[in-house]
Image (cartoon, rainbow, N blue to C red):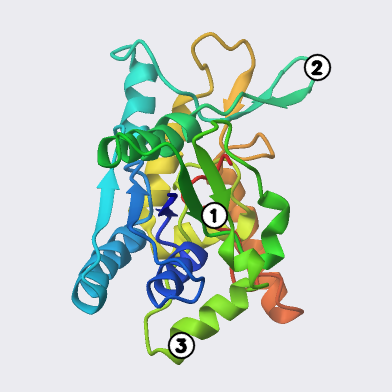
């Protein structure tokens, strides 16, 4: 017998997946939902998660488990300061100042702070179960992100894709039931952010943005890396980039809307 578990990111798609699953829209009803907390989500995500846990407990007598392998941001700072020897690295962008060649570091953070904590918790919850169906909140318009697990005892399932449910359908579903729509779920210091998301962080969560700036400035001389490191793909400082992004928004407001509603989201297993 397969046990059905949802890897919850507490963003739009994964939350919609959870609520639809609890209503029985995909046949099986999930037995567990697990949120892997990296310690670096926007404050709005944590606020929404707190509401969501209370809501599903009241409406469905369902519990969302929160697990963590530590605070990714604090661990990154500790490693840079030399007080932490081992660290699962963030995929910073690199720049050779002499040649101008750009690159990117290997991504280790997803496995350390997202995938492994979820799998460890599953083993703790169901130590004797040999097969797990892990549902992931990837919508039909993001189906290129589909990927199976690299372990035999877990099978990834994508119910939103099976039903051809797009992100806009998820948003409409929240509104139909009179529920608040989640904000995007993604680590604040993730180097894969688009410019429009950096602008959103800057305008809505100043403390989070300033924390990202602090880390960005500290990684220029990253331990063991000859090249300069950056959080932004342009290999320029976030302080400089946000000025250009703001100017771009002001220009766009006079012409066309270049900053539509954010569509990127971490499903809870961003490295799948």
Q: Indicate the secondary structure of the residue bearing disc 1.
A: helix
Q: Nearer the viewer, residue 181 or 169?
A: 169
N-terminal of the pair, mark 3 or mark 2, is 2
Circle 1 or circle 3, nearest the eye? 3
* Residue that label 2 marks: 99
Q: Residue furthest front?
A: 1
- Point 47% across, 42% down: residue: 189
Tell me: residue 199, above or below residue 151.
below
* Residue that label 1 marks: 198
Tell me: residue 182, above or below residue 136.
below
Q: Nearer the viewer, residue 87 or 100?
A: 87
The x, y position of residue 53, in whole percent, is 25, 65
Circle 3 or circle 2, nearest the eye? 3
Q: Quadrant of residue 8?
A: bottom left
User: Is residue 256 shown left or right of residue 63?
Assistant: right
Q: CA distance from mark 1 to mark 3?
A: 26 Å
Tell me: residue 232, above or below residue 53.
above
* Residue that label 3 marks: 175
CB under 8 Å between callouts 3 and 2?
A: no
Q: CA distance from mark 1 to mark 2?
A: 28 Å
CB under 8 Å between callouts 1 and 2?
A: no
Task: Assess disc 2: are there few (<14), some (14-19) or many (≥20) residues with their C-alpha within 10 Å of its C-alpha.
Answer: few
């Amino acid at each position: 017998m397969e046990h059905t578990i949802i890897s919850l990111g507490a963003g739009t798609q994964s939350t919609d997946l959870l609520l639809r699953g609890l209503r029985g829209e995909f046949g099986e009803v999930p037995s567990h939902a697990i949120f892997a907390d990296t310690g670096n989500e926007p404050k709005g995500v944590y606020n929404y998660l707190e509401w969501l846990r209370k809501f599903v407990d009241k409406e469905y007598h369902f519990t969302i488990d929160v697990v963590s392998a530590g605070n990714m941001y604090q661990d990154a700072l500790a490693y840079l300061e030399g007080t932490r020897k081992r660290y699962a690295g963030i995929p910073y962008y690199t720049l050779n100042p002499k040649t101008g060649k750009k690159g990117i570091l290997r991504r280790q953070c997803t496995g350390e702070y997202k995938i492994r904590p979820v799998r460890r918790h599953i083993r703790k919850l169901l130590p004797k179960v040999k097969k797990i169906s892990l549902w992931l909140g990837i919508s039909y318009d993001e189906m290129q992100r589909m990927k199976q697990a690299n372990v035999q005892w877990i099978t990834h399932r994508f119910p939103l894709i099976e039903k051809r449910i797009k992100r806009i359908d998820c948003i409409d579903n929240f509104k139909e039931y009179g529920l608040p729509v989640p904000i995007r779920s993604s680590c604040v210091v993730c180097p894969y952010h688009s410019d429009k998301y950096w602008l959103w962080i800057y305008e809505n969560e100043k403390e989070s943005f300033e924390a990202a700036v602090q880390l960005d400035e500290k990684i220029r001389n990253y331990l063991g890396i000859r090249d300069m490191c950056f959080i932004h793909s342009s290999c320029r400082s976030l302080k400089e980039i946000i000025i250009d992004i703001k100017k771009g928004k002001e220009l766009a407001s006079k012409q066309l809307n270049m900053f539509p509603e954010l569509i990127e989201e971490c499903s809870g297993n961003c490295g799948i």
